[in-house]
Image (cartoon, grey):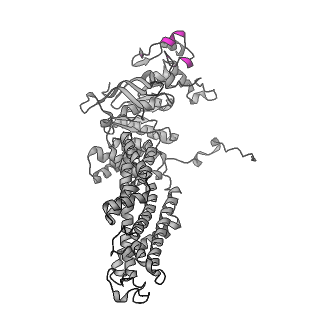
Amino acid sequence: MTSTPSPPPPSAAALPAAVLPDATLPQPARRRPHMPRKFWIGAVIVGGYAVAALLAPVLAPADPMAQDVANRLADPGTNHLLGTDELGRDVFSRLVHGIRVDLMVGFLGAFFPLVVGTLLGALAGYLGGWADVVIMRITDLVQGFPVYILIIALVFALGPGIRTILIAFTAIAWVIYARIIRDAILRVRSLDYVQAARAAGIPHHRILLRHVIPNTIHQSVIYFTSDVLFAILAVAAFSFLGLGVPPPTPEWGSMIAEGQPYLRDQWWLAAAPGVAIVGIGLGLSLLGDGVDDRWRR
Amino acid sequence: MTTTALRVHDLRVTAASPDGPSYPVDGVSLHVGQGEILGIAGESGSGKSLTLKAILGLLPPGLTATGTLQLASGDGELAPYQSHQVRGAGVGMVFQEPMTALNPTMRAGDLVALAARLHGRLSRRASRHRAVELLRQVGVPDAERRAKAWPHQLSGGLRQRVMIAAALAAQPRVLLCDEPTTALDVTVQHQILRLLRWLADEHGTGMIFVSHDLPVIAQLCDRIAVMYAGRFVETGYTRDVLTHPRHPYTAALLRAAPSVDQRGEQLAGISGQPPDARAFPAGCRFRPRCPLARDDCAHAPYEIQPVAAEHGSACIHHADLEVRTA
């Protein structure tokens, strides 16, 4: 290492008083940095899916459940944009209606764990003591099991269906949020503004909701976007295996399963829902990554 | 003599550890009158901040407090209290660091309004008006607009005013100030001190002002308590104590404080370190650093003895000190 002699720092006494900042003047508002580009790309993709889900009845040219056996396995064309499946149902219509099912299960499957995990983690971190011990040992227990084995066990116990999948997700995915929030609270709890709120006589639940959670939730939001994706993939996977959304409800995973026998000639039957899953996955990943970058600055 | 707003008797903070308990605050007694400002002066680690936290029951985990805490009720009668019941409306607190003591996710006005709504049982709309009113009262210029500002948009002085406004929203009888001006620069510090003095005079708020800064205490406080190693060593009216110190520690602190007339002279430090709470010396705790220490100081009982009207010292040789300073 080479060291170059640095010029002596200017003496504070030599500065005229007018140069020194006057702390009573308000500082200009610090501009928040913009969201990175990938956040916006992801937002547009996810937003596009959401709009398509809302407008599904308008966008879809046909009833996704209507069978037309005389016209089964039709090639893509003007009548059927992506052809028809083995029961003559319009694949494009089923794909668009499938967004509703998959996005809903994805978001709810990540939202319930977020709420449950945040509340339980907040209780553990803020109250400490036996509440902390009990809640954290349960998270250890849940995390000790392989996730898919747990879900499959619950599906067999409760029967297939959307409700089961949501219950299974909530029972499993809450642990990560509980851990994030608990650790964040242990850091935040000793901070001055939480102490100040306690000194002001603000009750515990308000301190948690107004002072602690808003300052710790951003890490959970990042996990939330990846959990939505995880939930969508899991729903598709379980439906593919026949453990998820029961037919004839249009769902991407079951559509892939139904298209599998015709992979050699009508490959688009399985490929189209596959591309749809990849698309939403890409969008959600970019979105979460962008949020993450923004918060790390 | 004003009516007493807060009385603390024989407050002791116990820190449990595997080597046995220690007492970072060891038998502190004090009282604050309405509209009176009591300064507690001392070095870092003397226990002055812990004293404030113990009064509000905000001690960190592992520390427990014993002693009698009494607060004046509406009719002026002193009554023992549970700390979690008086936080806010009975006793408020202003913290040292305005940068970290405001929640970064709450607008300044919302913070003040929340406190106003909880203690004044106001509606949302009324509490918002009250918040702007309070901000204006503590000297926030353009309070209407500032109420909508986030903490990071405010300067240190403004944040400290917001914190004071939030503490005042509950209309506390006593305000505890933990070095509220230490992190501010001198001109802003002066404004905040004037604000606190005004609050004591106009609203009758009693205050305990903790600081290591003797000139600030001299400027602001009616009475002063000098704290060393978990105990008060000298108490009295600020003027008496600072002009005629009757404890060698107070005298040493005064010599260590810079002042304009000592320009060019070397500042006198106090040799040695303040003792650790786990190993307080027996007898007088200042003895190892005291230039006047004698053999009998090692067996001196701790007791604040009256040395003049409303002036007490814990030094058993305070009479000699009077001769020296006179």
Find the residue positioned furthest to the top: B296
Picture residue at 36% right of the left edge, 72% below the top = A100
Q: Which secondary structure type mostly characterizes the magenta part of the structure?
A: loop
- The magenta stretch is B280-304
Quick one: B271 or A12, which is closer to the camera? B271
Quick one: A74 or A17, which is closer to the camera? A74
Quick one: A155 or A63, which is closer to the camera? A155
In the rendered image, is residue B81 in sight? yes
Picture residue at 54% right of the left edge, 25% below the top = B274
Q: Quadrant of residue A202?
A: top left
Q: Position of residue B319 (x, y in %)?
A: 48, 11
Q: Position of residue A287 (x, y in %)?
A: 48, 65
Q: Is residue A12 left or right of residue B53?
A: right
Q: Position of residue A267 (x, y in %)?
A: 47, 81
Q: Is residue A50 above or below residue B314?
A: below
Q: Is residue A236 above or below residue B79?
A: below
Q: Quadrant of residue A15?
A: top right
Q: Quadrant of the N terminus of chain B?
A: top left
Q: Is residue A196 above or below residue B37?
A: below
Q: Position of residue A264 (x, y in %)?
A: 49, 82
Is residue B263 one of those drawn in magenta? no
